[in-house]
Amino acid sequence: MNAQPKKAANLTISTELLEAAKGYKINLSQTLETALAAELKKCREAEWLEQNREAIEAYNQHIEKRGLFSDRFRTFAIERK
C-alpha cells in the first residue's frame, strides 16, 4: 500500500469529545482523515452533479421521449399474458 504524505495540522475540539475519544482509544488522526475523505467525496459528487445538471436533464428528457435503445431487447421486462 502506498502511504500518503502526512502533514501536521492544529485543530480545536471540544474537551468533552476529546476526553471521550481518549477513553475509547480512538485514533483522532485516522478518524478525521476518514471523515474528511467522506465529506470531500460528497462535495465532489455534488459539484459534478451541478456541473452536469443540464446534460443529465437533457438525457432524461430524451429517454422519456424516445425510450432506451435497449428497450426492444429487454424481454425480461415484458409482461406476459
Image (cartoon, rainbow, N blue to C red):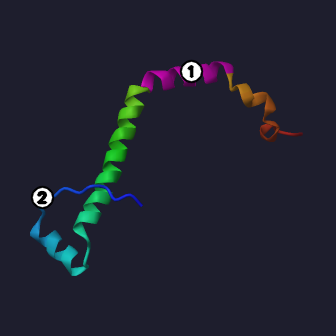
Question: Quadrant location of residue 51?
Answer: top left
- Quadrant where the C terminus is found in the figure: top right
Viewer-side residue, 5 vs 77: 5
- Quadrant where the N terminus is found in the figure: bottom left
- The residue located at (74%, 29%) in the rendering is 70
For the stretch drawn in magenta, the main secondary structure is: helix
Residue 2's x, y, as percent? 38, 58
Residue 15's x, y, as percent? 10, 70
Instruction: Determine the residue located farthest toward the right in the rendered image.
Output: 81
What span is colored magenta in the figure?
53-66
Instruction: Determine the residue located farthest toward the bottom in the rendered image.
Output: 23
The amino acid type, in three-letter code, at marker 2 is Leu
Query: On the image, numbered disc 2 is attached to which residue?
Result: 11
Question: Quadrant location of residue 69?
Answer: top right
- The residue located at (11%, 65%) in the rendering is 14
**Alpha-carbon span between mark 1 and mark 2:** 47 Å
The local crowd at label 1, few if under 14, some if 14 to 19, many if 20 or more residues have their Cα within 10 Å, is few
Point out which mark residue 61 bears: 1
Question: Quadrant location of residue 18?
Answer: bottom left
The stretch drawn in magenta includes residue 64: yes
The amino acid type, in three-letter code, at marker 1 is Gln
Q: Earlier in the sequence, mark 1 or mark 2?
A: 2
Viewer-side residue, 71 vs 41: 41
- The residue located at (12%, 58%) in the rendering is 11
* Image height of 72 relative to 41, above or below: above
Residue 46's x, y, as percent? 37, 37
The local crowd at label 2, few if under 14, some if 14 to 19, many if 20 or more residues have their Cα within 10 Å, is few
